[in-house]
Each structure stands twice: as C-alpha cells, then as structure tokens.
Amino acid sequence: MIRILPNAERDGEYVLWDGDVACGKALARFDDRVHILSVEAPDALLAEGMVRAVLNAGRVREIEHAVCANEELFPLLRHLEFTPCDEGMTVSIPDFFFRGCKG
C-alpha cells in the first residue's frame, strides 16, 4: 500500500512509503506561502501525489498560494496547471483543489 506521511521529526518533509519501504520524499517550507523545495519519487504519478500532499498540508494551515523555484519540477508543475511567476511556478491552493484531478 502506498502512503504519504509527514516526517514527525522534520517539519515540511513528507515521506512516500510503499508498504514498509520509504521510496520517496518531498521537502517544503511554510510561511505565508508553501515553498515546494524538492520532490523525489519513483515515477511521475507518485511525484504528482507528493505535490498534492504538500499542497494539502498548506491548505490545512490555511495557506492560499504555493511557489516553486526548482526548475527540475517545472514540467510536473505545468502538468498540474501551475503558472509561471517571477519566483518560478505558482498556484492558488484553493483553486487547485476546487478544479479537481486532471484527466
């Protein structure tokens, strides 16, 4: 079973578990925005799930916008309908979850 869980010892780190094996992680920083720092996953679909988990953590904290300056993530973020900004890519978190999953 695939799970994405926060690392209780490090705020902003989310670990991707396949059963009992850690197979990916995402790092983020939270202030007035969610800053997506990195995402590591075995494939694009799981990487998308990691981004969604980070954005959901921001939503729970009532943060409305996310940004990412990590150019390696831009293709994935474009697929998730992030838009370019001065800092890299951005998305409105409420709008992201309102529009649902992209088919």
Image (cartoon, grey):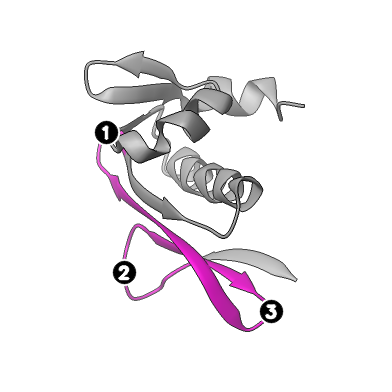
Q: Residue at x 71, y 26 (%)?
A: 102
* Residue 10 highlighted magenta (yes or no): yes
**Disc 2 residue type?**
Arg
Rounded to the nearest angstrom, the CA distance separating label 2 from label 3 is 21 Å
Residue 78 position in % (x across, y down): 50, 24
Q: Is residue 96 above or below residue 34?
A: above
**Magenta segment range?**
6-34
Q: Secondary structure at mark 3?
A: loop
Q: Secondary structure at mark 2?
A: loop
Q: Is residue 64 above or below residue 9?
A: above
Q: Residue at x 67, y 20 (%)?
A: 99
Q: Secondary structure at mark 1?
A: loop
Q: Main secondary structure of the magenta part?
A: strand
Residue pointed to by mark 2: 10
Say whether disc 2 or disc 1 marks the residue closer to the N-terminus.
Answer: 2
Q: Which mark is residue 69?
A: 1
Rounded to the nearest angstrom, the CA distance separating label 3 from label 1 is 31 Å
Say whether disc 3 or disc 1 marks the residue closer to the N-terminus.
Answer: 3
Rounded to the nearest angstrom, the CA distance separating label 2 from label 1 is 21 Å
